[in-house]
Amino acid sequence: MITIRKILILSAVIALIAFVPLYLHLITTTREFARYNSQWNGTSLFFSDLDSRGAVPVRDTQEILAYQGSRLLILAPDRPFSTAEARTVRTYLEGGNTVVLADDFGTGNDLLQGMGSDIRLLPGNLSSVDLYLWDPQTGRFYPSAVIGSVSREDILTRGVEEILLNKPVALEGGEPLAGTSVLSWVDRNSDQRVNANESFGRYDILARERVGAGSLYVLSDPSIFVNSMVLLDLPANNTRLIQNILDAEVLLVDQVHSRTSAEEGILPLLLLARSTMIIKIVMVALLSIIVAVLFQRRIL
Amino acid sequence: MNRRYLPLVMLACALTVGLFIGLNFPSPDLYVPENHSYSLYHQNPELLQMAPSESSEMILALMSQLMDDTGTVVLNIKVRDFETAEKDFRRFMQEAQQFDNLVINLELSETEIGEFNRYSQRNTELIQRLLEESQRYAELQSLVIKYRDERNPSALYSVTYEGEGLKTKIGEITRQYNAQASALTTLGTQFNLSTTRYRQSVSEAEALVAEVGATQETRKAEADSLQRAAPPSPEPGGVASVQVELQPDRASFGDTIRVTAWLNGEEVSGKAVDLYVDGDLWASGRSDPGGRFSYGLVVDRIRAERHVMYAGHAGIYSQVLNFSVMPVDPDLTLDLPAESGENVTVAGTLSAAGRPVEGAEVKTFLQDGILIDTVYTMEGNYRMSMRLPPGSYTFQSTFSDSSFPLNPAKSRIQTVTVREEVSLQSLITTIMIYATFLILFSMGAVVYYRHGKGGEPLFRLKNPFAFLKFSRKKDEPQEKGVVPPAAGAPPRKEEGPAPPEDRKAALEEPAHSQDWAIAQFRQLMIGGDLQNAVHGLYLHLRDRMGRTYRIRNHKALTPRELWKFATDRPYFGDLTKFIHAYETIRYGGVVPSAQEAEALLQWFSATSSAVERDHD
């Protein structure tokens, strides 16, 4: 005979089980490049690595000037850089630090222009005959899955021969460190084909520029940091490239302009709760009281 | 909501869900990962596969090989090593085919690579013809030696004229080969390919033409010399010579070139006359009484290039004339309905200069360059049918056949929307699936109705066929199941505790007597079945109150609802105690002591008696 008590306990267990995915759903996001996005297009794995390395999130651009001998990562920026912020980044570079900017369709050009760099991100998807993705069911190739190759040795390209990119753009200016094969083109109309007004040529995908005593690196695709690319079983050297990028005494991660900081809905509150000890204690206490009341009323 | 409608609502919901699932079961794509696989910034590599890499290396290597191998084949033709040339050409063809596939697969047709591929395909065709014509020309040499040895000037002239045709063809092929050399070398240079051997092959081809020209001059001279030494002796009164003229000497598709041959001699009427184009017999006929033979050569399936023509009669040949065929743009149409069933018919026409093109190869492609079919035109029309799944498709037909004096052509791109067709077979399948669902559902409902909990159905359907029922005999029991004992009668001890099924059935039966209910309670208590014992008392009270106060659907009342109903009744206190004790035992699993059981019976009896009084 199933008693009400048993039904209640069973219901509580089911509710608890249901709560776990709900909680997981609430503390994650589906935003592109977001650090709390654990899906294919998020950067949760990369940020997990960053956290384990003690990377410092930068929530005010002025803060970077306090870290001498550091490396600032600006991944997929989508918020505009003010003139003052661009100047700050330049000052930071001139002080002997390193900036790695990985961007394709974001506001990276604002920063580059604001800080007086010669490097530019060109509009349009960079595509290549040297590609690594295809759909065997339809037989369709994806030329925007570009394989680039390293052309010059540098601290970032050490041990790296090939870089797999995912819908990158082309770079102009600076010292090229890596580029595509000659059978590549800028797909201006995004039809994944070379049309009459698009021609083959070599394009840069990673470039360097000396600014004072520091170095500015621009990578034309932030997608190499997303989970699905990090997990990809690659014959190329993306992992090594990422390790080289992270190989710095002090790592700073921009959270002012980057898409990686995207938080929405209830997520910021939950993250605050998760990261604040007093809120954790209050939550546990509340739960304990609720359970006690249920027992006292003989509901449980 | 009234509880009696609950099953109907549930049934409606279930049917709605079943209908929805049923409608979608052939294509269960409510969610597929592809729905979430692409964005502006990247595509999901987890849903795709790794492609064969290093395509550019492969493409550039093939391009380099194609340029080099062209040179090798031409060189071997030039030195008349046809065996090696054929072997090299086969390899060249394989490479060209491989390159063509690569260009199609990588969708590079509209690129410089695609342009290179088109030149390469054209080179394949030109080199094949150059090889064939050069081989044929080389074969003629053995005939020349034979006829020279036989001192047969007529046969020697015949061979020489055929050689003249081949010379023209080889010259034309070389001209076309050289015409695209500049563009091809420019493309090669653009991709940092070595073009040395290819450019060398162009020079070799030109040298070959010069060599054939020189050989022809020698053959002509030999034939003339032989004829002077031993002039042909025409039959007495026969044909002495043949002349030919044609008008116009430039024509295009659909035009007619008027060819007239004259036989000179004493008896020229009704003689056989042959017309040769490029050394091949083109037309034959008999001369009229004036020795003339006229023929209208319709420009149809003949290459767009320079041709040679001559006439002949019984080993006597005319002078050699030239005419040129110029290419024109054909008109290729594609007729497709905007909407179609799954059987799609593609039709169209191919015409040039207002005339239908007969026997031309037309290819029709689906989007992304997928070849649907290749058909040949009949009276300028072509038609093909295929079966396609529902969706939107774009079609385009192409024509490219250099055996016609027509430039390659493409039709307009047409789009068709293929609707889903309900075939008889799928209709029957769907009906059978629905019928199976319905039967299973009905069986389930019947089983539940007849053998539901305690044999008591959740709801009773009014029998629409009740009017067909015969009236029940008076002595028949009204319902199946355990017949309750007469009021006040104690249970028969010799029967012992009823088996569980009987006990359950007995408990669900309406209690007609308070004493009977109490006796049942005691019996079950002795058997240790406490929960069913108290449940029996509760059912007795519920039914009695339901009948007494005419409570609608009283069998669905919970103990608390029953308790609330009796709030203003005088026996409310006893009922409250009874319900509390009932819940404690039945739901709480508490085992009552003997005193508590007696107290429970007292509250039950007091309540039951009070209800009985109200009933009276």
Image (cartoon, coloured by chain):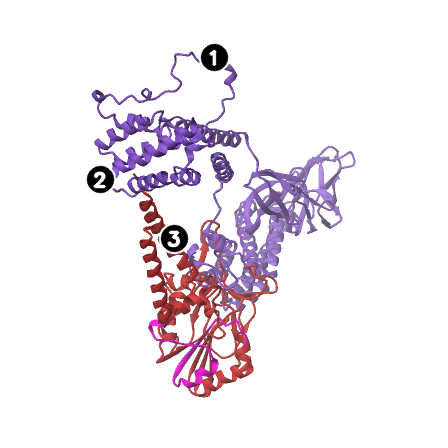
Chain colours: A red, B purple
Q: Position of residue B115 (x, y in %)?
A: 57, 59
Looking at the rendered image, the disc whose residue lies closer to the viewer, 3 or 2, is 2
Residue B173 rendering spot, x and y as whole percentages: 60, 55
As displayed, is residue B194 above or below residue B373? below
Tag shown at residue B470: 1
Q: Label 3 near label 1: C-beta < 8 Å?
A: no
| CA separation in Å, label 1 and label 2 | 53 Å
- Secondary structure beneath dot 2 equals loop
When the figure is inspected, residue B7 is found, relative to residue B65, above or below; the finding is above
Residue picked out by circle 2: B593
- At which x and y percent is residue B508? 35, 28
Q: Chain of mark 3?
A: A
Residue B463: x %, y % from top left: 49, 22
Tell me the SS state at disc 1.
Answer: loop
- Marks 1 and 2, the one that precedes in the sequence: 1
Distance CA(mark 1)–CA(mark 3)? 56 Å
Number of labelled discs?
3
User: Per the image, is A66 magenta?
Assistant: yes
**Amino acid under disc 1:** Phe
Quarter of the image with the C terminus of chain B in it: top left
Magenta stretch encompasses residue B210: no
Q: Provide the residue designation for mark 3.
A: A18
Q: Is residue B383 above or below residue A34?
A: above
* Range of residues picked out in magenta: A51-80
